[in-house]
Image: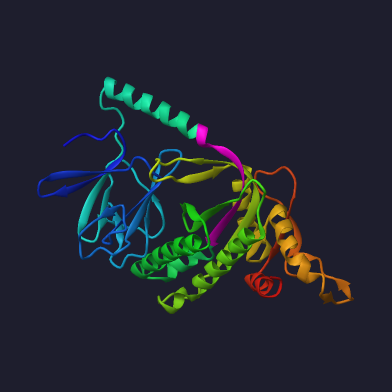
């Protein structure tokens, strides 16, 4: 068996250990279906069972995707993304794999790996560009309360299903899930040099609306103690965006204040008692979409409505890491659905 120069999964087979490399990408899916990166012919494994996601700081997360028989790390069932450590035992159905993240094989190998990483870092740096993006962060509400009131198997399957469907919905509306974090996901839409067009902003809003509807229906499939809800933060701005994957499997990620602010905006919805908060730049694009139709509408005293003002209210919030208060526009998912129905 050839030793890997990077992180890998070790699968025991009749002819010895087989290495499944975790190099050259940001995520790898595991399941019985042929569309997975790692196909495991185990009838106890779901078609799309789990996912491993690598991060910029060389950490690896394991995410269950709603598998019927569960995903386990060292015998403990996974319900939210968990960080893997060198030597962890992963169990999918009746198949066991060992996660390895080797450090130093030999001075010569270490030098070769260091050189390769320097070349890779240079190539990646060349691919990083400053681009206008929109970031969406979605978080499950009352997650801790639900875990205390739900059987572990049901809870794990329900949340795993939520992660899988969230990924499908984000993909349906033209993006991908950049990060799975605890009970939250982050998605990124990259806009062209001419800016964010109306169609892309509408795609983002429809994605968030669909995510909300999907979440609210999960209790019809699983015996949950109450219907699940989500909160969402949307922010548009410039960030460094780059390809951190291989040429045949590119994976893009975004870094910078635009991303951080999206997380803070999502958190602000809890303090505001609302469902969705957006940055001022996102809101300006939304206003431009709504303005032509809103100009023909009368509101209350007879004044003309101004774009999205009829749907989302202005708030000033304190956000962790920011020196002064930040202006946001926030509302409920009912307000969002009304905007999509009336203003488009």
| Residue 257 sits in quarter | top right
Task: Indicate how the structure is coloured in the image.
Answer: rainbow
Residue at 68%, 63% in the rendered image: 272
Q: Is residue 82 left or right of residue 43?
A: right
- How far across and down, in percent of the image, does residue 137 sit? 56, 56
Quarter of the image with the C terminus is bottom right
Q: Is residue 299 left or right of residue 181?
A: right
Residue at 20%, 65% in the rendered image: 43
> Is residue 309 shown to the viewer in this render?
no
Q: Nearer the viewer, residue 20 or 91?
A: 20
Q: Which residues are magenta?
A: 126-139
In magenta segment, residue 130: yes
- Tell me how many marks there are: 0
Q: Is residue 339 left or right of residue 180?
A: right
- How far across and down, in percent of the image, does residue 111 sit? 33, 21
Q: Which residue ends up furthest to the left in the rendered image?
A: 14
- How far across and down, in percent of the image, does residue 312 sit? 73, 66
Residue at 31%, 52% in the rendered image: 37
Quarter of the image with the N terminus is top left
Q: Which residue ends up furthest to the bottom in the rendered image?
A: 220
In magenta segment, residue 50: no
Characterize the magenta stretch by its predominant secondary structure. strand
| Residue 106 sits in quarter | top left
Q: Nearer the viewer, residue 314 or 72?
A: 314
- How far across and down, in percent of the image, does residue 116 sit? 37, 27
> Is residue 73 shown to the viewer in this render?
yes
């Amino acid at each position: 068996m050839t030793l890997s120069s990077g992180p890998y999964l070790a699968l025991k087979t009749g002819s010895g250990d087989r290495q499944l490399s975790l190099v050259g990408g940001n995520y790898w899916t595991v399941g019985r279906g042929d569309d997975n990166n790692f196909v495991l012919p185990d009838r106890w494994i779901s078609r799309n069972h789990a996912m491993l996601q690598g991060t910029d700081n060389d950490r690896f997360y394991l995410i269950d995707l709603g598998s019927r028989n569960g995903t386990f790390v060292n015998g403990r069932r996974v319900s939210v993304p968990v960080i893997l450590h060198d030597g962890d035992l992963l169990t999918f159905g009746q198949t066991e794999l060992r996660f390895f993240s080797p450090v130093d094989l030999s001075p010569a190998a270490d030098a070769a790996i260091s050189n390769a990483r320097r070349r890779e870092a240079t190539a990646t740096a060349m691919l990083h560009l400053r681009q206008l993006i929109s970031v969406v962060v979605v978080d499950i509400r009352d997650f801790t309360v639900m875990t205390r009131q739900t059987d572990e198997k049901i809870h794990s399957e329900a949340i795993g299903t939520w992660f899988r469907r969230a990924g499908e919905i984000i993909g349906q509306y033209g993006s991908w899930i950049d990060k799975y974090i605890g009970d939250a996901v982050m998605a990124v839409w990259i806009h062209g040099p001419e800016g964010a067009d109306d169609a892309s902003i509408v795609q983002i809003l429809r994605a968030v609306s669909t995510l909300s509807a999907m979440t609210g229906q999960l209790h019809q499939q699983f015996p949950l103690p109450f219907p699940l809800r989500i909160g969402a933060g949307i922010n548009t701005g410039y960030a460094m965006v780059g390809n951190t994957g291989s040429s045949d499997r590119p994976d893009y990620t975004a870094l910078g204040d635009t991303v951080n602010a999206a997380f803070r905006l999502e958190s602000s919805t809890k303090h505001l008692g609302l469902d969705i908060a957006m940055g001022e730049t996102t809101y300006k694009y939304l206003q431009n979409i709504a303005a032509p139709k809103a100009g023909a509408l009368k509101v209350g005293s007879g004044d003309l409505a101004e774009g999205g003002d009829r749907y989302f209210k202005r708030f000033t919030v304190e956000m962790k890491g920011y020196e002064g208060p930040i202006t946001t526009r926030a509302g409920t998912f009912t307000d969002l659905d009304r905007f999509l129905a009336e203003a488009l």
